[in-house]
Image (cartoon, rainbow, N blue to C red):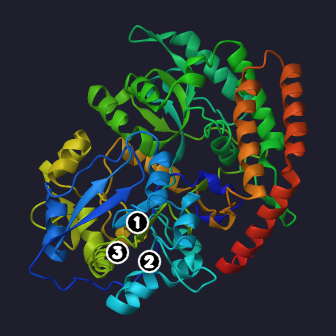
Amino acid sequence: MKHRLVQISAALLLSSMMLSGCSETNVIPEKTDDTITMDWYVNYSWFVTDWGENMVSKEITDQTGVDVNFITPIGNETNKLNTLIDSNTLPDIVTVGWWEPQIKEMIDSGLVYSLNELADKYDPSFYDVTSSKVRDWYTLSDGNIYGYPNSSYTPEDVLNNDNIAPNPTFLVRKDIYEAIGSPDMSTPENFYNAVVKAKEMFPEVDGKPLIPVGGHEFNSDGCVSFDQYLQCFLAVPYEKDGKKYDRYTDPEYLTWLRMFRKLTSEGYIPDDVFVDQRTQTSEKIEEGRYFCMLYQRTDMADQEKILYDKNPDKIYIAVDGPRNSKGDDPVLPVNGIAGWTLTFISKNCKDPERAIKLMDYLMSEKGQKLTYLGIEGKTYDMIQGKPVLKPEVKELLSSDREAYNALYGADNTYWMLQNNVMQLKWQTELDEPLKQMSEWACQYAAYVGQYEVYINEDSELGRIYASTRSLWGKTLPMLLLARSDIEFDNVLKDYLEQRQKLGYDKLAEEETRQIKINKEKLGIE
């Protein structure tokens, strides 16, 4: 089916792709005889890949004369970033999520360069390798753009490409699903019956209890599996009659939550689901202990490969799951124009000229091809005009991602400025079992960038936003753990009353205002 523009939450946009409209200009900075080392701060504790040992990073250094020393937080990302800002010790280059409140502080305090001024002074190719629409989106009232995103999509990208795969998927364990008759699970009743039957037929898997329903971890904001992803599958809109729509009180959504409450009260959603962190969930996926999940396909790719190697019949597959009472297709989000992360050049940068040239090189077609495919003749060959990974490279990529990163460093190991739309022209076909999940997701891809709103954390609205999110984070597990529908309704009533007192109407009004502006900027009716 053709991709479409839809109404859905921008908060879903935690998963991973890039922009269009860029020129195919190849940018190779004019090298100097010396190689300089740039400190690059990446605000994610899980990013542990080094620079300088694998093929791709060595080639980038050879092409640009820039070596990179990555700095990542140990533990809490927010604390680390705040410390760097407060002490004015930001490294040369900085990559953080576009939504982080510290971005405003970095800009207002003059801690980062405007990229357009660096481009004008040192390297005008910046304007060739970046998208004018994305630049406009991130240009502030002072006329400057300070950070550039990765993983950004425009509405045209989604409309014009049918091979863009969103991350949210409804997954079932293949052998169990087939054993119970491959049932339709699109209605609350059918979903409930399928879960009960799966547990009855398979009380244990490999000597451990089957977990009939799983999802992402619960945190202070709720759980994306049981709030935002479920709303996606039910095609709950984010706007009605020109105003922000309250998806959390949508009747279709609440009907499904009540069904999940019933499953929980009867023991089909065990306590583990409410307390497990990602590490524990990943271990249980690798053991095949879940029957079904609302989950991001890329987050379980490594575990899926392990399951496939053990037994291809015991993998997880994507199937049509929850739908609204009209049977509408799911609307699964890809990233919007804001992207995923923003990369800045700090005023502490030892050589801003070489920093902007490094960024431009990485965003050029040459840089994108290198970071995606690697080096021709070493990691891939061009066969009949198409890139084909060498067998040993493909094998390592599918079997041991950490070893692949250490040896080759391609396939967006260095994702900070990735442009997935540009990379579509070189896209290599996924192997099973990941191929099935990706192809299933493509048909439901939707653009939602018009609903990306920014609320200043230090403002009154910011405090309202934080308080309402925290309130929902406490309420969702209470709803699912309610012992009866009456208790469920009482919890919901209390939530709505508390939310109103916190100032929810003011927040909704501001979100409506920003959505209107976003739609005008994007040219969306």
Amino acid type assigned to the residue bearing label 2 in the image: Tyr
Q: CA distance from mark 1 to mark 3?
A: 11 Å
Which image quarter holds the N terminus?
bottom right
Q: Position of residue 35 (x, y in %)?
A: 13, 72
Q: Is residue 435 above or below residue 200?
A: below
Q: Mark 1 or mark 2, which has the lower sequence index?
A: 2
Residue 264 numbered tag: none
The answer to whether the residues at label 1 and label 3 have Cβ atoms under 8 Å apart is no
Residue 113 numbered tag: 2
Depth order, front residue of 377/117: 117
Q: Mark 3 or mark 2, which has the lower sequence index?
A: 2
Amino acid type assigned to the residue bearing label 3 in the image: Met
Residue 386 in the figure: left or right of residue 420:
left
Q: Position of residue 240 (x, y in %)?
A: 84, 60
Q: CA distance from mark 3 to mark 2?
A: 18 Å
Residue matched to label 3: 363
Depth order, front residue of 524/454: 454
Depth order, front residue of 394/329: 394
